[in-house]
Image (spheres, helix red, strand yellow):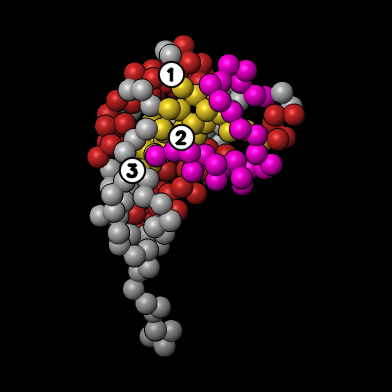
Amino acid sequence: MATSPILRSIAVFSGSNYGFNPEYIEGARALGREIAKRGLRLVYGGTDKGLMGVMADTVLAEGGEVVGIITRLLFDLGHLHTGLTQYEVTPDMRSRKTRMSESADAFIALPGGLGTFEELFEVATLTQLGEHHKGLACLNIGGFFDPVRSLLNHAVKEGFMKTEHSEMLIFNTDPAALINALERWQAPTVSKWIGSAPDASN
């Protein structure tokens, strides 16, 4: 097992909408309170929209440090949260994701849409390939990420992923337990490749 870094900052991926279930907002607030309580720095997408804004507002209200990393497009559209401790403007989404990854010791996903899924799976892929050794987790509010867990298990069953890689992603409904698990997390060191090509003559 590779050693993961000591947690000082956590990047959170989340929706720029609120979702239909009020539990999503409450979960974002609960995570924000826990991050601030532990003295961790929040790194996130920098806007005041949706669950992203709720979480940032909560961390700031609790006296925590919040770093926003936002694209030039969103900045020019006026989507920057105006109360942040610090912010960066990047040229595009690719550089935004790179800076978020570089600035964090671990990653948590809240409910969200395409951007959230894409960010989550990108950092998972980097962990699988050994390009970093940082823990990743989903705050599974209202069972939102149950289909993701099922998809990972399905990929294992069908021979596209090893169990060690499907299990490296933490799922929990409680923010404190989730961060505790991230503090103990260790990256798997197995190769991603499974066996050899089947014999086409058989």
Q: Which residue is mark 1?
A: 64
Between marks 2 and 1 in the image, the one whose residue lies nearer the viewer: 1
Q: Which residue is mark 2?
A: 11
Total numbered labels: 3
Mark-to-mark CA distance, 2 and 3:
14 Å
- CA gap between label 2 and label 1 equals 14 Å
Quarter of the C terminus within the rendering: bottom left
| Residue found at x 26% / y 32% | 180
Q: Quadrant of residue 184?
A: top left
Camera-near label (2 vs 3) is 3
Q: Quadrant of residue 77?
A: top right
Q: Nearer the viewer, residue 10 or 137?
A: 10
Q: Is residue 64 magenta?
A: no
Q: Which disc number belongs to residue 5?
A: 3
Is residue 179 at all visible to an observer of this figure? yes
Query: Within 10 Å of the Cα at label 1, are there few (<14), some (14-19), or many (20+) other Cα atoms?
Result: many
Say if mark 1 contacts mark 3, CB within 8 Å: no
